[in-house]
Image (cartoon, helix red, strand yellow):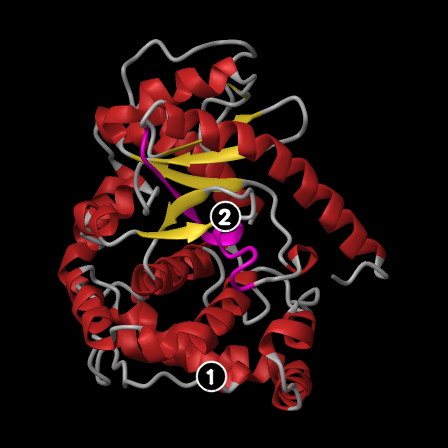
Amino acid sequence: MQTSNPSNLQNIAHYLIYKNHLSFLFNKLKQNDLPFLVLKGWSFIPDLYPDPSLRPFSDIDILIHPADYHTVTTCMAELGYSVRVLVRAGSKPAPSGSKPAHPHIPLEITFSHPAGIHIDLHTHLLTLAWWQPAFPIDLDHIWHTAQPYPDSTGLQLQRLSPEVTFLHLCLHLWNHEPLNPRFHSYIDLVLLLRKYTPSMHWDHILHLADQWGMQNILSIVTQILHRDYHTTLPIQINPKSPPTSLQYKYIHSQFSQSLKSQSSILNTQSSILNTQSSILNTQTSNLKPQPSILNPPPWLSSFLLRLALIDTPTILPKLLWNALFPSASLRTAIHNQPRTLLQHWGTYTHRLLKS
C-alpha cells in the first residue's frame, strides 16, 4: 500500500471511513433480502486495485430493483442516510427538508450520511431519462448475469459480469468525457481488460453492443485504449455509422482533434506503461490519471458528440424532441421531481450559458 504521498494517505482514510459504514449498510440490505449490485469503483477494490489508495472515489454506486426502492430507502434512513437534494444536478434544489410528494421512483438519487458517506442509488444503468430510447439496455440480463465477488468489507456481494462491466464503463465514458484518456474509467478499463480479457465472452459483448445501441461508443473507446494505453481487444469493433455518414466524419474529426491536443502527454504516458512489468503492483500507480491539460469540453460540444455516437440516427429527432418538449412524466424523471416545461427550459438554458 502506497502511503508516502499525501493524496494516497487521504484516499486511504477516505476508504476506511467508507468501508466501516458500508459494512453496516450492505449487511442491513442482505438481512432484509434486498438484492443489489455494487457498480464501478468500489467493486474494483481489491480485485483490480489491491491498493485502495490508487482508486479515488467520491461516492458509491449501487443498483437496485425499482420495486425495492421504498424498502431500500427505508433501511438507509434507519442507518442515518437522507436525501440532501431531491433533484438531479443542474436543476433548482427543492427546499431543505422537503420530501417528494409524488410516487416517482428515481433513476438515480444520492443519499448522504452525516459521516460524509454518499450513496448513489440507481434503478437503471442509464440514468439520463431522455437518452434511454437510444440505448435499450436489458436490465433482466444485467441481473441474470451478475456475479458474486469478495467485497473489501469482507462480505460476499454481487457485481456486474466482466462483459457488462466493460459495456457500463464505456457508457459511463460516453456520458462524461469519451475523448479524455485521463478520465478514470479508462484506467478501470485497462485493468479490467488486462485481468479478464482471456475469460471474457467477446462475441457476447458484440451482440450486446448491437442490441443496446453501443457500437459507435465501443468503437471510439477501443480506439483510445489502443492509441493511448496500447491496449488491444481480441476482436475488431467497427462503428455502426458508415464512413460516408456525417456522424462518422464528425466523430473522426473530434478524435483527430483530441490526438493533436494530447499527443505530447500521451506519448510520455504510453512509454511509462510499456516499461511496467506488474499490473497489480506498480502499474496502477503509473496508470493513475494526472490533471488534464485540457479543459472539459463545452456543454454543447459534448452534447453534439454524444448525439453523433448514437448508433441509430433515425432516433435523433425523437431524442431532440424529448429534450426540448419532454412530457410531464419525462420531466419528472429528468429532474427527480415535477417540473413545468418553462422550468425545464430554464434549467438547460442556464447550463448552456454556463458552458
Q: Position of residue 296 (x, y in %)?
A: 58, 59
Is residue 100 at all visible to an observer of this figure? yes
What are the residue bounds of the magenta stretch? 34-48
Q: Amino acid at mark 2?
A: Asp
Does 284 sit left or right of 148 as displayed?
Answer: right
Name the residue beneath numbered marker 2. 151
Does 116 sit left or right of 307 as displayed?
Answer: right
Is residue 338 at all visible to an observer of this figure? no
Residue visible at 21% across and 73% down in the picture: 206
| The N terminus sits in image quarter | bottom right
Q: State the residue in front, 237 or 334.
A: 237
Q: Position of residue 117 (x, y in %)?
A: 61, 32
Which image quadrant is residue 175 in?
bottom left
Q: Does 120 sit above or below residue 115?
A: below
Query: Is residue 29 inside the magenta stretch?
Result: no
Residue visible at 33% across and 68% down in the picture: 217
Query: The residue tagged with tag 1: helix, strand or loop?
Result: loop
Q: State the residue in front, 29 or 265.
A: 29
Query: The residue tagged with tag 2: helix, strand or loop?
Result: loop
Query: Is residue 38 inside the magenta stretch?
Result: yes
Name the residue beneath numbered marker 1. 231
As measured in the structure, the alpha-carbon distance from the residue carrying label 1 to the one carrying label 2 is 27 Å
Which image quadrant is residue 108 in?
top left
Q: Does 38 sit above or below residue 50?
A: above
Q: Amino acid at mark 1?
A: Thr
Q: Position of residue 162 (x, y in %)?
A: 35, 63
Classify 10 Å Cα crowding around label 1: few (below 14), some (14-19), many (20 and above).
some
Residue visible at 85% across and 55% down in the picture: 6
Which image quadrant is residue 153 in?
top right
Q: State the residue in front, 313 or 183.
A: 183
